[in-house]
Each structure stands twice: as C-alpha cells, then as structure tokens.
Image (tube, helix red, strand yellow):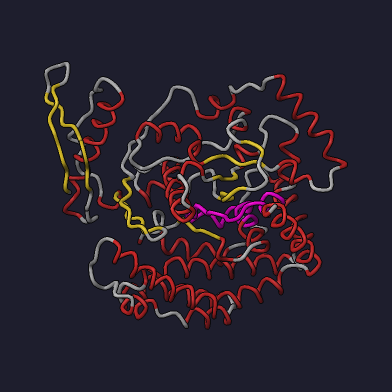
Amino acid sequence: LEISMASLPTEEGMCATWLVAPTIAAKADAQCESSLGWLRGMAQWHAALMCGPPAPVCLSTCGRKAQDLCCADIGGHERQALVLRGSRKSTTSLDDMVRNGSMPGSLQSELDYLASTLDGNVDPGEVLMRSVVATNVACSWTDVTRLDEMLYFWGTNIGSIDHFQMSCKQDHADFFVSHSWAEPPDWCTVMGCHAQYAEVKAAELQLVAADLAEERGLRWEEVTFWIDKCCIPQQHKLMVTCVHHIEDFLQRCDRMVVLLTWHYFSRLWCVYEWAAFLAYHEAKSLRISVETFMRPASRDLYLKAIPNISIQHCKCHDETDRVVLKQKIVQYYISEDAFENFAKGTAVAMMAVTVAEIAGRSDFEFETEFFPWIRLAYDIGQNDLANALLQADPVAWRKSAGLEFVVVGSEAGNRRLKFQEKLNEWFDSYVQPVLTSLKLRSVKPEALQVLEKIRSSVTEKKSS
C-alpha cells in the first residue's frame, strides 16, 4: 500500500490521520489482513473529514480476511475494489422506507391517461419506454457517502413513485440491467459478511458506465440504464402492463449488463431476461459483471447452477410469475426444452468468454478457469459448443500480445487490445456461429421475423 498522508488536529485535540491521495497497489494475500482493516478506518476518516466534523471511528478494525479485497479486471481496466464496509442498520426496515413514497395527483392523472390510451396503441413499448441516468443508481467504490444512499436503493425490490420519477421518457437505453434483487442465501459464506450486496451492484454499474463513457467520449454519469424499479411506475396499475411488455424494453436497450451472482440462474425471471435478450440481440451486446463474485468458493456454484436451469425448478418470488413466464416461453420458443437448452448453451458460452482473459495467465489458470466450461458444454449435450471452446488458446494469445511482461501506461493498453482482438476473432469464427444455430433451433421462426421487424424499426427511429 502506497499512501500519501497528512495529519490534521481534530476539535477534540486528537491527531486524526487524513487520507489525501491514496494510490492502492495491494495484493490480496494473507499478509495484508491488518493493512486492510487499517485502510478501511482510513477511508472512513477521509469521508468524515471531507463531509463534516469527524465522527469517532475505530481504527483498530484489523483482521479482515484477504478475500474481502476483490481485484476486478473489467473492460480492460485493472481495478482494486474494496468490499470491506460493515453493515449499517436502521431502526426502520428498507421495505417500510420505500413504501412511504407518495404519488402527486398530477402524476396519477398522467399515468391514468397513459393507461387509457394503451389499448389502441400498436407499440405500447415505445410509449412506456424510460431510462435512468447512471448517476442516480451507481457510484464509485470510493464514494462512501453515495454508497450509503445506494444501499437504500438497491437493498430491496420494492419501489415507490419517487423511484419512478428518477427516470424519464426515452426512446432507448444504453443498458438493460438484469440481476437478482435478493442476495444469495450463502452470501456471507462466499463473499464475507463485510461485503454489502447492494453496494457491490451500485459500484459494478459505475464501472460498466465508465467503460461505455470512455468508449463514446461521455461522462459516466450520462450513461442510461433500464431498471425495473425506476422505469416501471410503482404503486400504479401500469406496473402489471409494463411487466407484460418486458420484451419491448429489452428490444429498446442497446446492451444488457448482467450482475451475475452464482444464484442468478436459479431465478426464473433472470433466466428469461437472459434468454430473451440474446434472442433479440447479438451475444456481443451482453456484458457480464462476474469478476467480483467469481471466487474459488463460488466457481463450482456457477458450474452447478447452469445445468440445473429449469422452468419448473427455478425460483419465483411470486408463483403467478411462473404462469406468466410459461405463457411467454410458449409464445416465443419452440418448446420449454428448447428454451432451457438455449439458456444453458448461451450461459456456458458467455461465461467461458468472460473468464478467457484470466485463463490466459498460465496453463494452470486455463485448466482451473476455462477448461471446466468446455467439460460442462459436453455434459449438457452441446458438443458443437464444446468444440468451439476447444479452439480457444488464451495462453498463447496472451504471450503473443506481450502481456506476460509487466508494463504500464499506453503500452499496457495496446497489448491488452491485441489480446482482445485475438479473443474477438475466436468468438466470431467459432462461438457466434454455434450460438446463432442454437437460436434458430430454439426460437420460433415467426417470433424471429417479428423480432427482426421490431429491431429494424427501433434502429430506424434511433437513426432519425
């Protein structure tokens, strides 16, 4: 840890250490346990000094496990992600807090009128489509104050009209956000009890927004998301209508980001969103945020979850949702088996692509990180996919790009770009054709024709 520090006296005459300009280069191993506890205290002191009078913070909270320091390598950026913040408890439950929202009479009237016009509208998705800017739902790992606010938003799926007013009417969104609102039951066992699921989601979305902003020359705060809690009017009858038009929203999102915990594929809504998006869009439009969640303790959980994808056994918060989703599957897919196979095959393929960069670091990493996905493709009966994955050689790609040597600055970016080009070439040549074939065997031809017309219409409107 390289820390630039200064000492400032507090009102109590104590000597508080002020974190001025941290440059974190920590390796997550057992030797940094005490440093991590010290760093957490330092970050809290920094927030207190920047936001007001210092609050008493215990600086001797050492002994944090090294696994609570997550190294996230996302979108070509090496990032150190601290997931060390302890639980903050409120005397009022989160569900009670969000239920306290009220609906202004003018908005009630506007939504009522909108609902009355939908029956005759040939494209209700266009009328109902909204998006929320990233600054309202995401924040940096280092923004302690905003993380507390994000805990309030991401801590429950129950929303209010106040959340709806965070979004605005738009023709499309940059990302559809697919995730499970509830944390995995074994979250503390896998991630450690100091990692807040709600905060991880907010911070991951900020990284996603930052990558797209860099690509487009925008500020990350301007990137837009479709999130049900913001973009569906809570506490209004239109909420049911919007749920029935989930496909329209998926079509009007350029990309989808999946906050992929190991229990994501056990939730039927999550599986449906995953499959539906890949039925409408190319697989390259799917962004998986899994690096923070993928640990030795969770790797096997992912490998076990995908073969168990089942309409019958996946969980629903409300069993009436299963009826609705079954009707949608019958409408768009050749059969329930076809839907399940499509979800399983695409899940294995995209997970393999996501871990390919890590797998390129050594032959050992290839065997532990990548090869299990090849084996799983064979196990679920998708031999074409397994053969496509076998064509990957990320270790050789990494060496040819010069990534086995430590470099910094623009040269590091150039070498990573060379590796990414090799990865893209493999995906386009071997994996994408398998996924296209799988889609044609799974989705009804008439549904594909309708989807293509809608996609063309959306593209034309965006261009105009």
Q: Farthest residue in the top direction?
A: 11
Q: Which residues are magenta?
A: 248-273
Q: Is residue 439 left or right of residue 36?
A: right
Residue 62: x and y in percent read 19, 40
Instruction: Tell me what residue is drawn at x 24 percent, y 22 percent.
Output: 54
Q: Farthest residue in the front direction?
A: 464
Residue 445: x and y in percent read 78, 70
Task: Please check the rendered image and state whether residue 333 is part of the magenta-colored stretch, yes or no.
Answer: no
Residue 166: x and y in percent read 58, 32
Q: Is residue 44 left or right of residue 264?
A: left
Task: Please check the rendered image and state whether residue 265 is part of the magenta-colored stretch, yes or no.
Answer: yes
Q: In terms of depth relative to the viewer, which is nearer, 108 or 453?
A: 453
Q: Farthest residue in the right direction?
A: 120
Residue 322: x and y in percent read 70, 51
Answer with the quarter of the image where residue 219 lies. Answer: top left
Q: Is residue 68 above or below residue 86?
A: below
Q: In terms of depth relative to the viewer, which is nearer, 276 or 29?
A: 276
**Residue 155 visible in the current orientation:** no
**Residue 23 visible in the current orientation:** yes
Q: Is residue 205 left or right of residue 85?
A: right
Q: Is residue 153 left or right of residue 459?
A: left
Instruction: Tell me what residue is drawn at x 75 percent, y 61 percent.
Output: 451
Q: Is residue 173 above or below residue 91?
A: below
Instruction: Tell me what residue is drawn at x 68 percent, y 46 percent.
Output: 171
Q: Is residue 330 above or below residue 462?
A: below
Answer with the quarter of the image where residue 421 lies. Answer: bottom left
Marker count (numbered)? 0
